[in-house]
Amino acid sequence: MRARPDRTTSDEDLLADRDLLERLQDHYDQIAVTDPTGYHLHTDRRTPKDLADHITTLIPTTRDLRALADHT
């Protein structure tokens, strides 16, 4: 986040208050653990293209969906 050229006031607040950042990270970790649809996406040092490519790999293909349907 420190390297981002487009930091918001909220970003600056998180960087200035380490406890606040840790509480926020803990909150998202708790959500990811209890929500089966949740996914903790690490964004550090990843470009928007890297993130898009990674997210695309998480989307099931038609073949994946057919295989799931065949097993139910």
Image (cartoon, rainbow, N blue to C red):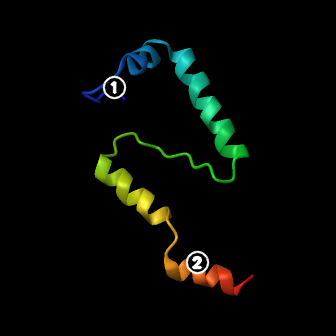
In this rendered view, identify the residue nearer to me: 27 or 67. Answer: 67
Residue sitting at the far left: 5
Near mark 1 (Cα within 10 A), the count class, few <14, some 14-19 or many ≥20, is few
Point 58% across, 77% down: residue: 65
Position of residue 10 measured from the top left corner of the image (x, y, whole percent)? 43, 19
Residue 72 horizontal/vertical position (percent): 75, 82
**Label 1 amino acid?**
Arg
Q: Using the numbered discs, state the Cα–Cα distance from disc 2 to disc 1 in whole angstroms.
A: 40 Å
Q: Which residue is mark 2?
A: 65
> Residue at horizontal 59%, vertical 83%?
66
Could you say which disc has been placed on residue 2 in the image?
A: 1
Mark 2 nearby-residue class (10 Å; few <14, some 14–19, many ≥20):
few
Mark in the foreground, 2 or 1: 2
Task: State if disc 1 and disc 2 touch (CB < 8 Å).
Answer: no
Q: Is residue 70 above or below residue 52?
A: below
Q: Amino acid at mark 2?
A: Leu
Q: Quadrant of the N terminus?
A: top left
SS at mark 1 in the image: loop
Label 2 or label 1, whichever comes before in sequence order:
1
Find residue 52 and report its horizontal and vertical position in percent: 36, 55
Horizontally, is 21 left or right of 29 in the view?
left
- Label 2 secondary element: helix
Q: Residue at x 31, y 47 (%)?
A: 48
Query: How many marks do you count on the picture?
Result: 2
Answer left or right for 21 relative to 31.
left
Task: Specify the label residue 39 is tagged with.
Answer: none
